[in-house]
């Protein structure tokens, strides 16, 4: 089998049609053809055609990934899931993600740092809740532990909890003040626990916050 003609497609100028033995065989992006090094007159096999199709799929998957990243940063797992939903083969997706990771276009550590910072800035939470959010994004255990240690330096989890408790108390002060002290403590403690703070932190912060109003 011999490549007898290569011509640019009229409706899609970035793509070319490859003819083998005077018959149309396959259409690919011109970048795929350039990377293959194939020219008119070259001998080809069925494997050659299959390789071109694989490279075409990789290029399409990469373009899809770039479009997704142009909207917002994503973790490797998020990107993989989205590309798989678009119908790309797992092998293709992994090659694209590896390529993007090597060039720094995706970086789970930097993504996790930015994601955690944004979450804590919007509304403070404890380590367990932030860890859960990061797991949902597909972040690895090692990166999660590193990011948590950076976000929660010494005593900062107490500070996050205190900030949240004060805001909660200010917002619902009138209703809180109508409750008995034990009910005030329970309501505030339950709220902080739901936000992922451990019992030791919750206990300290509840006592301090309610003590400030006495």
Image (cartoon, helix red, strand yellow):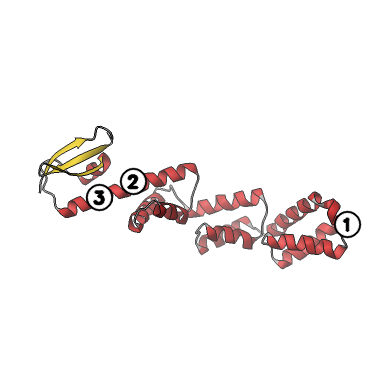
Residue 187 left/right relative to 213: left
Which residue is at the front of the view, 119 or 5?
5
Which residue position holds label 2? Answer: 60
Asked if the residue under mark 1 is in contact with the one under mark 2, i.e. CB atoms within 8 Å, the reply is no
Could you classify mark 2 by the number of other residues whose Cα lies within 10 Å: few (under 14), some (14-19), or many (20 or more)? some
Which residue position holds label 1? Answer: 178
Q: Give x and y (percent) for residue 22.
A: 10, 41
Asked if the residue under mark 2 is in contact with the one under mark 3, i.e. CB atoms within 8 Å, the reply is no
Could you classify mark 3 by the number of other residues whose Cα lies within 10 Å: few (under 14), some (14-19), or many (20 or more)? some
Find numbered disc 3 in the image and state the secondary structure of the residue it sits on: helix
Q: Give x and y (percent) for residue 171.
A: 79, 49
Residue found 11% across the figure and 45% down from its top: 42
- Closer to the N terminus: mark 1 or mark 3? 3
Which quadrant of the figure has residue 32? top left
Which residue position holds label 3? Answer: 53
Image quadrant containing the C terminus: bottom right
Find numbered disc 1 in the image and state the secondary structure of the residue it sits on: loop
């Amino acid at each position: 089998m011999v490549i007898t003609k290569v011509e640019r497609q009229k409706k899609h100028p970035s793509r070319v049609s490859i003819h083998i033995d005077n018959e149309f065989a396959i259409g690919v992006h011109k970048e795929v053809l350039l990377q293959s090094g194939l020219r008119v007159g070259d001998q080809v096999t069925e494997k050659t055609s299959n390789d071109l199709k694989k490279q075409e799929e990789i290029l399409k998957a990469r373009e899809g990934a770039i479009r997704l990243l142009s909207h917002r940063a994503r973790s490797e797992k998020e990107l993989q899931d989205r590309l798989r939903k678009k119908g790309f083969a797992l092998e293709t997706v992994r090659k694209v993600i590896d390529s993007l990771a090597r060039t720094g276009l995706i970086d789970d550590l930097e993504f996790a740092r930015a994601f955690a910072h944004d979450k804590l800035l919007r509304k403070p939470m404890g380590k367990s809740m932030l860890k859960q959010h990061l797991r949902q994004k597909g972040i690895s255990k090692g990166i999660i532990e590193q990011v948590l240690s950076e976000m929660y330096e010494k005593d900062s989890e107490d500070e996050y909890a205190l900030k949240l408790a004060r805001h909660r108390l200010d917002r619902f002060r009138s209703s809180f003040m109508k409750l008995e002290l034990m009910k005030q403590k329970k309501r505030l403690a339950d709220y902080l626990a739901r936000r992922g703070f451990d019992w030791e932190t919750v206990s300290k912060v509840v006592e301090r916050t309610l003590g400030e109003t006495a």
